[in-house]
Image (cartoon, rainbow, N blue to C red):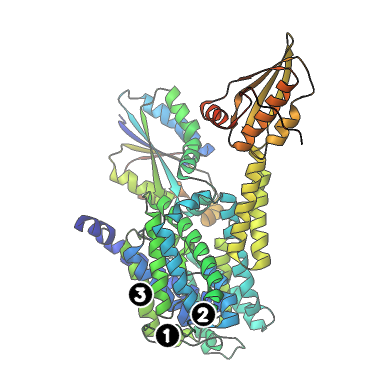
Amino acid sequence: MTDSINQQWFSNIKGDVLSGIVVALALIPEAIAFSIIAGVDPMVGLYASFIIAVTISFIGGRPAMISAATGAMALVAAPLVREYGVDYLLAATILTGVFQLLFGVFKVAKLMKFIPRAVMIGFVNALAILIFMAQVPHFLGISNMTYVFVAITLVIVYLLPRFFRAIPAPLIAILVLTSIAIYSDFELRTVGDLGTITQSLPAFLIPNVPLTLETLMIILPYALALSVVGLLESLLTATIVDDMTDTGSEKNQEARGQGIANFITGFFGGMAGCAMIGQSVINVKSGGRTRLSTFVAGVFLMFLILVLGSLVVQIPMAVLVGIMIMVSIGTFDWSSFSYMKKAPRGDALVMLTTVAIVVFTHDLSKGVIAGVILSAVLFVAKISKIRVNKTIIAGTTRYAVEGQLFFASVEDFVNAIDTDVRNEKIILDFTAAHIWDDSGVGAVDRVVLKLKNADNHVVIEGLDGPSRRLVEKIAVFDSEHAKLPSH
Amino acid sequence: MYQSILLAVDGSNHSIRAAREAIKVAAFNKESKLTVVYVADHNNAKTEVLHSNSTEELDLARRKRLQPIEEALATNGVDYVVKILHGTPGPAIVEFANDGDFDMLIIGSRGLNALQEMVLGSVSHKVIKRVDCPVLVVK
């Protein structure tokens, strides 16, 4: 026990403290920008980032993964805030925590493997597009200086890291451009125009919502969407961190941890969050390996806000927009274009459908659900292709069946067999087939009875074990008195 | 003679050329042992995980990238082991090379010009500067 605590916390102290600080610096602009996307005060995202990071560092299942306020959750929450206000978001956050905890307890995290990669690719692409679209109102047609600041920010965040990496480039962009904005009187909107910063630690509070069934019905769909989206991104991120560090992680423990972290966050004025792909990658690349890195990231973030909070309101929105454009470019999966050429058509269609539905509905969870359903349907369509080869040798007709016989493929099977013949020897060969369900057995039964009624001699060959047991259990064609009812 | 040889590869044609030279070097000494090291780049982790359905599939994709090299080594009777590292290629190779006891490091070079090197960064260049053992760069 002590060994594993040492291993999970103190086996890489220098690397973890440094990477935690780097992540905290990179988190500040994102937490503020995601708050603005959700339509809440910057403090709601900053408190969430502090509390979620610190909580998850103790109880998460994937050491060195960074969880905080995220763009995905902010986008899901935005309509709720717009319509009902921030207190309903806090209540939804608490309920999200309960759902995610239950998902973890009942091991729903395991179901994640049923989400095809085409849906996951669509998910990150849609997320990138939505983050970008959320920036448009903050830079389009505000002032010429806004465009200049966005452009300078992009130049800094993309070129500076080639020469200097000790401090995250987005933070340098903020420091330099905020100073310029303060000492000049350009026409720029600042964070202060959209919200306030309080330089104090988060305090326990109960969201100010009526405890009624009506409230529950308002927050329930949002909480469900937040739970699904949060777990989706968290478990994807966990797999990425697993791969980067060549270690394993506890996915169900992570789901429970995300739940507890969100539950607590909601009571301290923070919005729902989840794991962050970009920040977790930064953390591991900067040397973070244990829970300590996540803990340091959360605590140092809070420290910076307590010390520098008054400066945060002076940050020009244009700089945050530039940073968010970088985030959306980094989130987008640019290999999707070659994927669409190489991948099977169905997969490409699922990916595009997921993106299209998210962009159309502005709801990430709807896109994911539609993507999963579409790929399930396409999968059934694909495996329901059944081939029946008819050969006549020495007066015996042989039907060689190839494929999966189940509810979706029985029609093709029945149609492929000529049942209008009389007094013939017929062999149904199932060597390359498998019968899955009652419909499959029913089809075989029907065909055999029909043929037998017309005085044909029918033999069934090559059923594999499970198919034969199913046929023996359900079929009636062997019983002497079985007659095909006429309809 | 070179007893313990490290061959750094990325599955590209340059690294296959490097593998051919490694086979020649290994042929000097019947006792020589070759370690093939491949770095799964941290910068590609997100894309690779996103595009694979399972860790098994991802592992297979990576091993397939090394297959031509392994085939060349095996058909020439070289005694070799494969090691897959996770990190940033340059520093990861340097650390692995300096931690191990290697007589020689063989690595391919893309042969970038000055501008490409500034934008893309040369892995072999970084490795040459910081590795302790002799390095053979194959272009």
Q: Position of residue A437 (x, y in %)?
A: 59, 37
Q: Please state the horizontal and vertical placement of residue A240, each as a whole percent of the image.
A: 45, 54
Viewer-closest of A408 and A277: A408
Quickly name the residue at label 2.
A88
Q: Picture coordinates of residue A82 (x, y %)?
A: 60, 81
Q: Are marks 2 and 1 on the same chain?
A: yes
Q: Alpha-carbon distance for marks 3 and 2?
A: 29 Å
Residue A330 seen in render: yes
Disc 1 to disc 3, C-alpha distance: 13 Å
First reached walking from the N terminus: tag 3 or tag 2: 2
Q: Determine whether B97 is above or below A445 in the image.
A: below
Q: Identify the amino acid type marked 3.
A: Phe
Residue closest to the eye, B49 or A109: A109
- Look at the numbered discs 1 and 3 and tell me whether their residues touch, using CB distance below 8 Å: no
- Mark 3: few/some/many CA within 10 Å (<14, 14-19, 20+): some
Residue at the image point whose x is 67% and y is 46% from the top? A346
Q: Amino acid at mark 1?
A: Gly
> Which residue in the protein does label 1 denote?
A309
Tell me the tag on residue A300: 3
**Which chain does tag 1 point to?**
A
Describe the element under mark 1 as helix, strand or loop: helix
Q: Is residue A171 left or right of residue A133?
A: left
The answer to whether residue A405 is visible is no
Q: Residue at x 52, y 46 (%)?
A: B52
Chain letter for the residue marked with disc 3 in the picture = A
- Would you identify the image quadrant in which residue B80 lies? top left
Q: Residue A377 has which mark?
A: none
Depicted A24 relative to depicted A452: above or below: below
Find residue A430 and report its image quarter: top right
The residue nearer to you, when weighing A373 against A171, is A373
